[in-house]
Amino acid sequence: MHLGSPPARTSLTVLALVAAILALVLGGAGSAFAHAGLRGSDPAEGSVLATAPKQVTLTFTESVGFSDDSLRVLSPENARVNPRPAQHVDGKDNTARVELSDKLAQGTYTVAWRVVSADGHPISGAFIFSIGKPSGTAAVVATDSLEDTAAARLYGFLRHVAYSGLALLVGAAAFVLLCWPTAAAVRPVRRLLTVGWVALVVSTVALLLLRGPYETAGSLTSAFDLSQLGRTVTGRPGIALVVRLGLLASAAVLLRRQALRLDRHEDGTTPGDLGTRVRVVGAALALALAFTWAGAEHASAGIQVPLAVPVAVLHLLAMGVWLGGLITLAIVLRRRAPGGGDVPASAIGRFSTVAFTAIAVLVGTGMYQSWRQVGSWEALSTTSYGRILAVKLAAVVLVLAVAFFSRRWADRLDHEALPAAEERQAVPEPARVRVVETVGAPSAPLASVADGRPDGPAGGEPGDGTEPPALGTEVHRRRLRRTVAVEAVLGVVVLAITTLLTGTQPSRAANGAPTAAATASEPQAKVVTVPFDMGTANQKGAVQITLEPGRVGENTVEAVVYTADGGFATVPELRLTLTQDALGIGPLDAKLKNQKGYWATYDLQLPMAGAWTLNITVRTTDIDQVTVRETIRIT
């Protein structure tokens, strides 16, 4: 198949290489977006409440799902104090709320949560709040990595098997339908289709069983818990896996029918065209299979979902056509069938065009996914996702370099095959002539004469420097086998890195969630306790001030007065003003109001970050009052 002049093809290949590098530098060619993060909670982390709350509410950055044990509130004695499982608040998918038991004792309570984000990945965390005053706690929350369980490790491996099965099935089918229909009768190609289908079926069934333990950090034996499996098949990832199994059953029927059709040709020939209907049905099945990934994983969460899902589908299919087609081509090139059954040069040329198109689709979809996931050049070196992506970039550069040589040998093979075919059609069969033989004289050497010339060596006289066409074609075919094999191996490496990327939090999400990260390591509220002494008996105590979130902007302020023995104290007046001496700001009156047990305000505006001085005036009687000061840092 003629693909244009060699200089033009070389320029196109170089341009494709440059475009792929730019696309991948901007980001990844994977299909991931953001894992959810905890945006806020009520009660806030680290807060000290005067009275026991009725419920605990968590708000996340995106929609989440949860099981019966997703949200647990533990007392200081490590007893669970939420009798019922979590529910969404007012139908909002990004919230989780549990009701608490009545008559909670004073002390520090622990909130432990583990939910599943919209992209299908579980996330977890914990924080504390106190009622009355802080105390020690016996509650223990697991701090192991979510991926550091047997179920999670096996689940990650099976996801790679599923991607590999998709690549083999789609790539081998595309090679047969688009490049060489006769390959449908080649036994190694049939085996490749079977291996891809079996790998997809086995991995999908295993993923369906392991989905429950993966989400809940359970043991491997819980994979056969029917109640847990029932919850799995009602969630979006479980539904996608069930649909995938149905599509694979349909694919098995189609493959079986085509195999029987080919086997009915007893003369050993195969149909030259598998038919438009088969191509349409095969394309529809491939699109639907790719959608079971895109519609339930990373592309289905975050920004621009209606665009991200079809882009992810195209990316997966292009990956399968390119990588699976490479493996198929490598197998048929190594095949040594009797009777000249090698893959024709025209089929190799068609695959070169198909592979180039697939790479172009990978570049285009990769550029969009790159912008969606990474967001900045700096993230390539400052985030885990960016560093893994850099490794993938190096592997892709190697793949494209090897692909350049593969297409070079494919073009040479194609160009040499066309003149040979034309020569076979143009050269007539040599005419037979009668040779006159003289009686009694020595016989002349017998020779077949064509056009008045004796036959000579096919490649010219020995030593004339010309190479027989058959030998040149075999050299190009051997070199093509080597480069295609190397390209396929590197493609498998890229696929493995891509699978790892889909399980890693993207750079945009990591950089866009500093608040969520801070909530896991820093309190969401600033709490200070300031002792005071009136100078008379029974006039000693402490006042506790809580600012939430303790940052620039609007803040909630709660103030509680304690007696010397730690009990609650009721005072007739409590005033709070804030000043920032360095900038000459203040005093700002917090305007605290008596809330029948504690004092509070809910709209204090702090205009600047830095060290602020709290001026607290406590009046215990009509004539007794004291003012104390404490410094707090606002961020």
Image: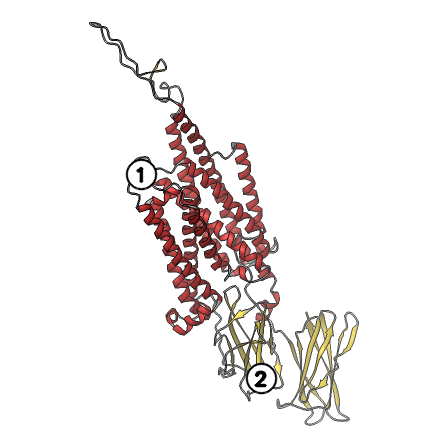
Residue 456 place in picture, x, y as percent: 34, 18
Q: Residue at x 50, y 42 (%)?
A: 356
Q: Residue at x 33, y 47 (%)?
A: 261
Which disc number belongs to residue 54? 2
Say which of 456 and 151 sits in front: 456
Residue type at numbered disc 2? Lys
Measured as percent of width and height from the top left, residue 464 is found at: 39, 19
| Label whose residue precedes the other's in the sequence (1 or 2) | 2
Q: Is residue 382 visible?
A: no
Numbered disc 2: secondary structure: loop
Q: Which residue is mark 1?
A: 337
Asked whether, in this view, residue 7 is left or right of residue 533, the answer is: left
Mark 1 crowd level (few <14, some 14–19, many ≥20, 10 Å Cα): few
Residue 84's place in the image compared with 284, above or below, is below
Q: Is residue 426 above or below residue 173?
A: above
For the residues marked 1 and 2, what is the alpha-carbon distance in whole angstroms? 77 Å
Circle nearer the viewer, 1 or 2: 1
